Image: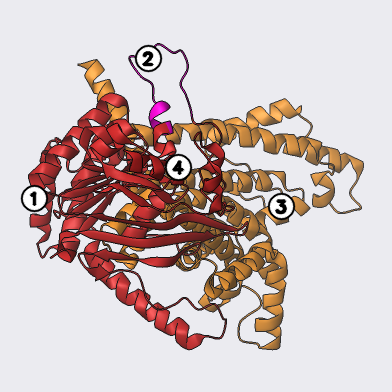
Amino acid sequence: MAENSKLLEVKNLTVHYETDEGIVEAVNDISFHIAPGEILGVVGETGAGKTTIARSIMGLLPKPPAHVISGSIQIEGQEMLSDKPESKGFFDFAQKRARSADERRLERIYREIRGKKISMMFQDPMTALNPVLYVGDQIAEVIKIHENVSEAQARERAGEMLELVGIPADRYKEYPHQFSGGMKQRVVIAIALACHPNLIIADEPTTALDVTIQAQILEMLRDLQKKFGTAIMLITHDFGVVAEICDRCMVIYAGEKVEEGTLEDIFDNRVHPYTVGLFDSMPDMYDNSLRLKPIKGLMPNPMDLPSYCSFYDRCSVRCDACKDGAPVLREINRGHFAACSAAAGRGEVE
Amino acid sequence: MVKYIIKRILYIIPVMFGIIVMVFIMKAVTPGDPVLELLPLTATEESKENLREELGLNDPIIVQFGKYVVGVLHGDLGTSYKTKQPVLSEVAERLPNTIILAVWALFIAQIIATPLGIWAAVKQNSAVDNIIVVFTMFGASVPNFWLALMLIQWFAINLGWLPSMYNGSLISWILPISAILVGSIAHTARAARTNMLEVIRQDYIMTARAKGQKEGTVIFKHAFRNTLIPVIASIGSALGSLLGGSLIVEQIFAVPGVGKYISDAVSARNYPALQGGIIVIALLCCIINIIVDVLYTVVDPRLKTTFMKSSKKRVKEAV
């Protein structure tokens, strides 16, 4: 069945942060899916909304200020967002009760999912581990939560997980500060994989590490992914990382999906001017030019997004049609989507 | 670890020396003559001069200082002008009362305030949080001597439930301890709340939630110990201000403690008693700070390994 082939399906997700300064439109109408065993790269610059998407999936958005305005998140067919509307009125007690009861129900379901079906790796391994607990116990914790095992069994399993990520099990009783950054990230991977989840959301897992360690960590992620058949949603701003391990790739700009496709689609046949700009801004070994070619300008303020294409102001191929309204996501080839009025025309010519 | 403790104990020596110097400078610059307090108004100039000579007040200040330091090193804090008793035994007699007052206030404050602060932080911006914030702000800004007088007014005079003065019974401890306790709870709760707010925003709390852990366990297993680190660190300084505060509260409730001893000594220009009291209180502060620092390494493994590493390194070098 088509529905069951999707591990995760996100439809029209819109998330806003309501702050004192205004409403931050962090994620705008994003839809995507991840199939079992697939590695999806999510690429975008800082502030594009990548982490917000990841946290929405995990149900770990900081509420307040975050509000899920609309959309649906289905994990193995199970809807994870409340369909009860958020009450705006102060006296809507019945509605408020219904909403909070529904949220409690979803939170219970989420507790079963987090760590077991979907686990998450955070950006900075330096701060992702609790400084006052043994690293081994931090791995054993997730096993104890989700599996009906004794304390001793959980410890043994945690030791095995340490060995699996290349750390001797006799370092079980050490604290995170005794580990290097790369080793901490290995521990984080061990925590993420401990209960053999179907999906790992890796939020910039290598950004805080130096390049040689990055390569090691990526290689290990790929090997373990092959071994367990785990799907990975890899959030990054580095196309090099995407090229290394991903099957498919999605480019995010100002909270919107601008292009999505297989690695070939994105690397060889990219159509959206933002994706093109991202590639152009990467250093090229065979190019003799002295300077990089960055995309001019800055990302629009997420509190004040334009009604038309949000990339318009920085775009090199813009035309009058671009100002007529938000661009529609069009399928250029099978499975290759881009949201650009100008590029869509080019795609048809192709 | 033992090396560290010994090092900390050795640090006490310069600290105490500095305190003796400061007390002596204070004595040299304060106006007033203890002899006038000790002798009747009708005393002759000659008897005054004799007493001054007898008490060593005519010696140059540096000689007085030298004699005093030698005395302290021999465990002699001098003789009280007023009672002609050794200061050390007088202070030792009163010390337990001060310790009871300060330590109980501190202990009860920790027990009540830490959970209160954590509760407020977990329910940030809720009604509970606002109530706790307002009350702790009130508690932190009320001076303890005013509170002491109000407590006497309400509970001793109007209601007549509790004795207004310390009379040696257990029940008469309630008012003095409460007078100190309110400020102490307020300060500790505010510190605990701030620390907890910081800790629950840390990445490792998100990691714990991402494991599917229950929110309560996240708070108590992952956040609590990290919150305790700065809270324990603040105990040392809190105790300093508690001992200072007990000086006034002891006076108001007539608790025979070191605080009252010191304030009596100040008004009588009883220099040996004053110096002895201050030195003992300072020593007490130093010792408690060492205990706090050792406790600190128990809660925070990062510090413990620092000591272990340095000692291991030395062992390697020796080999």
Contact, mark 3 vs mark 4 (Cβ under 8 Å): no
Residue B131: name its quadrant.
bottom right
Residue bearing the label numbered 4: A342
Element assignment for label 2: loop
Which chain does the residue under circle 1 lie in? A
Q: Which is closer to the viewer, label 1 or label 4?
A: 4
Marks 3 & 4 on one chain: no
| Amino acid under disc 1 | Glu
Between B183 and B161, the residue placed more toward the observer is B183
Residue bearing the label numbered 1: A156
The residue positioned 48% from the left and 57% from the top of the image is: B197
The residue positioned 56% from the left and 81% from the top of the image is: A89
Boundaries of the magenta span: A277-294
Which chain does the residue under circle 4 lie in? A
Overall secondary structure of the magenta stretch? loop
| Position in image of residue A265 (x %, y %) | 27, 38
Between A160 and B251, the residue placed more toward the observer is A160
Q: Which is closer to the viewer, label 3 or label 2?
A: 2
Total count of labels? 4
The chain whose colour is red is A
The residue positioned 63% from the left and 56% from the top of the image is: A21
Q: Which is closer to the viewer, label 2 or label 4?
A: 4
Numbered label attached to residue B265? 3
Element assignment for label 4: helix
Q: Quadrant of the N terminus of chain A?
A: bottom left
Q: Which is closer to the viewer, label 1 or label 2?
A: 2
- In the rendered image, residue A291 lying in the magenta stretch gets the answer yes
Q: Is B97 situated above or below A276?
A: below
